[in-house]
Image: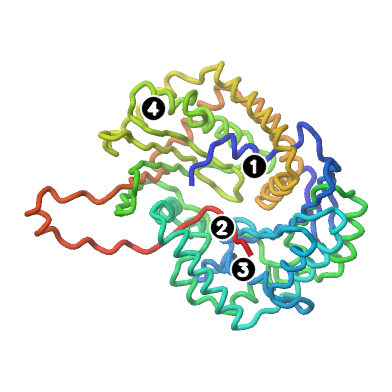
Amino acid sequence: MLRLIPAPVSALFCALLTLAPVTARAAEISSFTLDNGLDVVVLEDHRAPLVVQMVWYNVGAADEPPGKSGIAHFLEHLMFKGTDDLAPGEFSDIITRNGGSDNAFTSNDYTAYFQRIAADRLELMMKLESDRMRDLQITDEDVATERAVVLEERNMRTENEPGALFAEQRDAAQYLNHPYGTPIIGWRHEIEQLNREDALEFYRRYYAPNNATLIVAGDTTPEEVRRLAELYYGPLEPSDNLPPRLRPAEPPQIAERRLHYTDPRVSQPYVVRTYLAPERDSGDQREAAALTMLAELLGGSPATSVLGRKLQFESDAAIYASAFYNGVSLDDTTFGLYIIPTPGTTLEEGEAALDQAIAEFLEEGVDAAQFERIKMQIRASLIYADDSIDGLARRYGMALSSGLTLEDIEAWPDLLDSITEEEVIAAARRVFDKSRSVTGWMQVPEAPASAEAAATEPAPEPAAEPAGIVEEETGQ
């Protein structure tokens, strides 16, 4: 039941992505739970005659059975095939003919499906989405076709992108035992083996009202949403074999890990380091709020952030430097640092300059004026972010599907505003533990020293094959 007591990204963006509305209250928030376990949240906003319907399933790539990596994302593709009432492709065709749009995305902790359409078409959206919650129909031909599509997607987004391959390797090194180390899209050799039985077993177990949250945002009322939800979602049977959401835990991380990724396609060498970091926990978000502020202080605006000022302007060590953190995660997440050294500055020198800048920050403390500016920017941005009903639905869905509650979401703006300079420094000292870190160098192959050396240079080893994306979204 819904509890009412409940690649580099800037901390400011993450703060907005996970919280937005409550301060301005453009949307009125209400919730209820159907008898079959479906949680429903209504974000009532009558400023435009539009609605967004989103269904969030509490299952993602990190919940996949061993050896079946990519099955969550693969099923996302298959959900656009037919049901007992709809032919393959008819779902999206109907929405398009009614002037709407739809899509879906898969992450580590959830899979979500959404439609954006005129408010008077909400009943049609509920009829369509509830139909495929329990009545998906797929053939072996559907599976073969979509498996090929997913493999090509992996080729385009991962195999042909050095940065994606590099990120995939770093994630695998960061998590020694937890499934966050497995790419969301899956390992190629396991995707190739996924079949119809795998997809249907995963679907029947996890795609059920008692494992989902329905979010409706826009020009509607709680009374209307309840009426339609009970009519279309209410009759659906819950899953009777839904397992507890338990995942392998990380053992103590006691050794720093380093990796060098070399690829001739690299256009700009850089250094990135990630540290294992706590996520936003329900009822206990203060550490995550301090880390959110820390990331913004270190890596927000290049002109005013600590790393921008120290590395780009004072020392000329970097073309770009930043920090990133996103606390919306079911389990431990990461805090990252990033530097692109200037031409003539080696990666080793760039990393040393980054470490020096962090050490100086810990010694000097937080600039009070800058700290207040960042808080003011966040307060303003939270208000502006309230203007998007799509953003509202997504922010609430992400948080609720990651173990947070409505009360946690509403408390977030005031919590950010209450964080002190001392808490930020204390959080920084805790998170910057190299025994819990992975440092990666992204670089181009070294050129042979001379023609003679080139003649005797051994052929390079083929690059190891893996891949990784943070969040995968498909256009159906």
Asked whether, in this view, residue 185 is left or right of residue 136, the answer is left
Residue found at x 80% / y 51%: 51
Q: Earlier in the sequence, mark 3 or mark 4?
A: 3
Q: Secondary structure at mark 4?
A: helix
Q: CA distance from mark 2 to mark 1?
A: 16 Å
> Which residue, given by chain and number where applicable, does mark 3 sit on?
77
Q: Secondary structure at mark 1?
A: helix
Q: Secondary structure at mark 2?
A: strand
Can residue 58 be seen by looking at this rendering?
no
Q: Secondary structure at mark 3?
A: helix
Residue 366 or residue 105, whichever sits in front:
105
Q: CA distance from mark 2 to mark 3?
A: 11 Å
- The quadrant in which the N terminus is found is bottom right
Q: Earlier in the sequence, mark 4 or mark 2?
A: 4
The numbered disc on residue 280 is none
> Which residue, given by chain and number where applicable, does mark 1 sit on?
17
Q: CA distance from mark 3 to mark 4?
A: 43 Å
Q: Earlier in the sequence, mark 2 or mark 3?
A: 3
Q: Quadrant of residue 72?
A: bottom right
Q: Is residue 384 above or below residue 83?
A: above
Q: CA distance from mark 4 to mark 2?
A: 32 Å
Disc 1 marks a residue whose amino acid type is Leu
Disc 2 marks a residue whose amino acid type is Glu
Q: Is residue 95 above or below residue 47?
A: below
Disc 4 marks a residue whose amino acid type is Gln
> Which residue, given by chain and number where applicable, does mark 2 sit on?
472
